[in-house]
Amino acid sequence: MSKELSVSFVLIAEGAADHGLVTPLETLCVLSGADLASGNVVNFSALFSSGRLPESSGRSIAGKLQDAVATGQIHDQINLLFIHRDADDADASSRYREIEAAVHEASLHLPQAVAIVPIQATEAWLLLDEEKIRFAVKNPNGKVDLLLPKVSAVESLARPKQIFEETIARANERRRGRPKTLNKSTMGAIRRQLLETLDIEGPITQLSAWQKLQRDTARAIGQLREALS
């Protein structure tokens, strides 16, 4: 009888708005072969405001890794690490190299690291589910055409962040009691909700960046399982 594999991971996210990735990553780990999975995100803003990190602390990937270890966010019970950065380009290869170099530069004893690099920006992943978008803006019965791109075109979008904001505004619709525009806080909450409810067995599986994340996660979890035997 094989031993139970419990994955405990930490997410180093690009920004606070990306913290919602933890939930789909937990599901991805289980689908990739883990028996159990639980994750936490390093909340750098909270560490700064509490004084546990100086405001002058480095914001590079290597700096974030060092800060996460120094503050006890990455410890011996963590057996997997996810590092998230937008590609900010149609080609993500340089970003993968950057993350790999940062892990080496951090010069720390770290768990296995898996890179999460959406083509262009994470917002591209949030343009795949019309029903979830309408639900997130609390307008599930909206009729305005959201003009969502085809799944095959999502990774070719040059400005996914702007398109996402325009899509949310469109889904919100302007009517009595509903503001024409949404403030930054509300937009961030909507973005986080859409990340948390990401359907990782839906259209996103057609995107090359997600397919690579699936492969890399499965490989990492396979290695963790091998280490149990």
Image: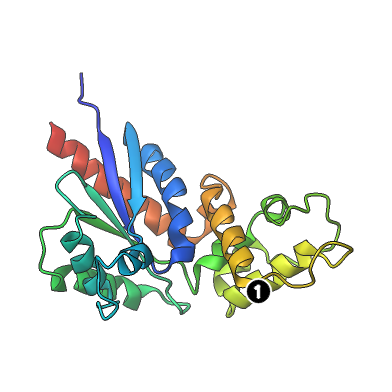
Which residue: 77% across, 63% down?
172
Q: Which residue is mark 1?
A: 163
Q: Residue furthest front?
A: 50
| Closer to the camera in the image, 18 or 178 | 178
**In what quadrant of the picture does the C terminus appear?**
top left
Residue 154, position in %: x, y?
59, 67
Color scheme of the displayed model: rainbow
Which residue: 25% across, 33% down?
5
Which residue: 59% across, 79% down?
159
- As drawn, is 155 to the left or to the right of 116? right
Callout 1 secondary element: helix
Image mark count: 1
Residue 116, position in %: x, y?
38, 62
Q: Can you tell which quarter of the image residue 81 is in?
A: bottom left
Q: Residue furthest top?
A: 1
Residue 204, position in %: x, y?
54, 54
- As drawn, is 181 to the left or to the right of 119? right
| Closer to the camera in the image, 62 or 71 | 71
Res. 48 visible in picture: yes
| Closer to the camera in the image, 53 or 184 | 53
Q: Can you tell which quarter of the image residue 175 is in?
A: bottom right
Amino acid at dot 1: Ile
**In what quadrant of the picture does the N terminus appear?**
top left
